[in-house]
Image (cartoon, rainbow, N blue to C red):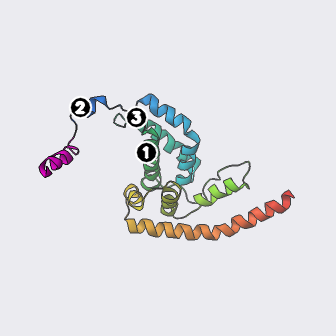
Amino acid sequence: MRHARAKLTMSRFRPIQNAQPDTEYATCVDFCETLAKDLKPLYLLAFLLTGRHTQAEQCFLATLQDCVSVNCVFKGWERPWSKRCLIINAVRLVFCGPAESGGEPDPWCEVDIESRGCSAVNALTRLAPPLQRFVFVMSVLEGCSEHECALLLGRTPREVVEARTHALRQLSRLNLTFTEAADQNATHDC
């Protein structure tokens, strides 16, 4: 009886020989539909990571190219795959590409620059150095683990933790600015 139970348990871990032919992979059309549906949040993610509209556009276009040329992603995994490709492309642009002339990052929006959403995006793009911005966006906003952040950024988990801590400290200082701006807007609206 004990031998039969062990045999049954072990058989669950054996690969099924016929699994491959029945598996569906995402097509170019699947990725295009996903990217079209997620255009705004993906562009926002690209902008938060790069801090520049031109780099965010380059990042999104590189992600589109990567996604439509891949043929080994399971159907239903288009969204996380697209997001991962976008993060990888942003890392390449910011850390491996030619450095842009320093200075302030681009403003998120030109029209309603005092809105809370615009102010929050602008504050996040001002996290410096870029490693702190990437770690904060990836770990806090996107929910990537420390290990995954470290792998994608080519850093150690300790560097990731330190960068996130510094980013949170910077943002806590900026919180006073948000509060003051919100109070001023509230008094002007009344």
Please report whichever mark, 3 or 1, sits nearer to the chain's N-terminal start.
3
Element type where label 3 sits in the image: loop
* Picture coordinates of residue 119, whole percent (x, y): 68, 57
- Residue at 47% across / 67% down in the picture? 163
Q: Is residue 97 left or right of residue 111?
A: left
Type of amino acid at the residue the image marks with label 2: Asn
The magenta span reads 1-15
Tell me, yes or no, whether the highlighted magenta stretch contains residue 5.
yes
Image-quadrant location for residue 74: top left
Q: Which residue does the numbered mark 3 point to in the structure image?
A: 75
Q: Which residue does the numbered mark 1 point to in the structure image?
A: 85
Element type where label 1 sits in the image: helix
* Picture coordinates of residue 159, whole percent (x, y): 41, 67
Type of amino acid at the residue the image marks with label 1: Cys
Mark 3 vs mark 1: in front: 3
Q: Is residue 167 above or below residue 92?
A: below
Type of amino acid at the residue the image marks with label 3: Lys
Mark 1 vs mark 2: in front: 2
Quick one: 10 or 94, which is closer to the camera? 10
